[in-house]
Image: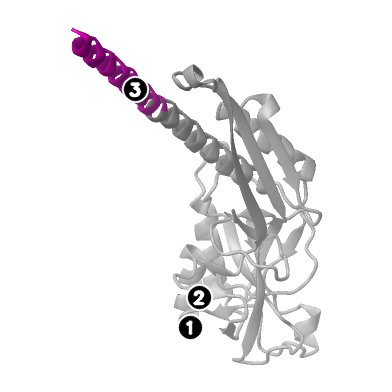
Amino acid sequence: MGWLRDERGSIAAILALAMGVLLSMTALVVDGGLLYLVRARLADAADASALAGVQELPENPEEAELVARDFASRNGVPAGGVVVNISDNWHRIEVEVSQTVNLMFARLFGFRQVEVKAKSCARVGPVRAVKGAVPFGVERQAFEYGVQYTLNYVSNDKDRENGRHRGNFGALALGGTGGGTYRDNIKYGYSGTLHVGDWVETEPGRMAGPTWQGVEYRINQCDHVPGCSWNSFVPGCPRLVYVPIVDSAIPPKGRDYVQIVGFAAFFLEGVEGHGSSARVTGTFIRTVIEGECWDGEDFGLRSCRLVE
């Protein structure tokens, strides 16, 4: 009967070993799956927080941190589990989130808790390319937020009188020449994509009729209630226009070419004038759109993206 006792002892040892392996596998599957889900949620929270916060940069770094922390909280991250760092030039934000997870089966092996972390970094910068721009070539200058600017020129502008921009009134021939193309580009935005560094053709002449028609069309398309204004508008409002900023070092004369050095956003306020005059005004704003950002000259129209 001794051999039977030995066999039973061997079976018990094997069963104990099997149970240990089974528990280890269960801990790996259950707790490992839990940690994976928490890590994925934290990664999403870090991405969302970084992208939300970076849109306040570079003007409002304090607000950027508050927004990032708020988004992390909305995504279930505990208040003490958020660390926000903003770069010295205020163009990058890094958000690290963490959460302590109580393990289930792994505690049988002495592991009770694990701290799970996720980190994300986003940057903001001027856009390098724009689709849907309106055909006004605004000269490079230092724009001030909330201030109205003239987006084109009229026949009595001083620079036109002294011949500095002979025959040009700020119109661009995007995708073709003529008043019809120019008017449609105001109404709907140019269907192509413009890039910083592109040379674009000017559209000489006052173009008063097409200018009036295009601008009034866009303004009338804003049917939001309450009506939009430069500091309170619905995203995608037709009165929000993207304008190429052009280099005026060599003034264009007649049908000529100008180089795009950046892009800016304006809220269309209206068009005024009489006879052959049509002065377009817009309020300068800063906004963020989708697209590639770069480290070039900043005219307030920006893009943001995750970089880590």
Q: CA separation, marks 2 and 3?
A: 81 Å
Whether residue 208 is situated above or below residue 37 in the rendered picture: below
Q: Can you identify the residue that label 3 sits on?
A: 17
Q: Residue at x 62, y 67 (%)?
A: 243
Q: Position of residue 30 (x, y in %)?
A: 39, 25
The amino acid sitting under disc 2 is Tyr
Q: In the visual, does 67 lie left or right of 223?
A: right
Q: Residue furthest front?
A: 2
Percent from the top left, x then y, of residue 290? 53, 57
Q: x%, y% of residue 77?
A: 60, 28
| One can see residue 213 in this view | no
Q: At numbered mark 3, what does the secondary structure look like: helix, strand or loop?
A: helix
Judged from the image, the secondary structure of the residue bearing numbered disc 1 is loop
Colour setup of the view: one colour
Residue tagged 2: 182
Residue drawn 68% across the image and 62% down it:
281
Who is closer to the viewer here, 121 or 168?
121
Please rate how many residues cluster around mark 3, counting C-alpha atoms within 10 Å: few if below 14, some from 14 to 19, many from 20: few
Which residue occupies the foreground of this view, 48 or 193?
48
The span picked out in magenta is 1-27
Is residue 26 highlighted in magenta? Answer: yes
| Residue named by callout 1 | 178
User: Could one spot residue 21 in this view of the protein?
Assistant: yes
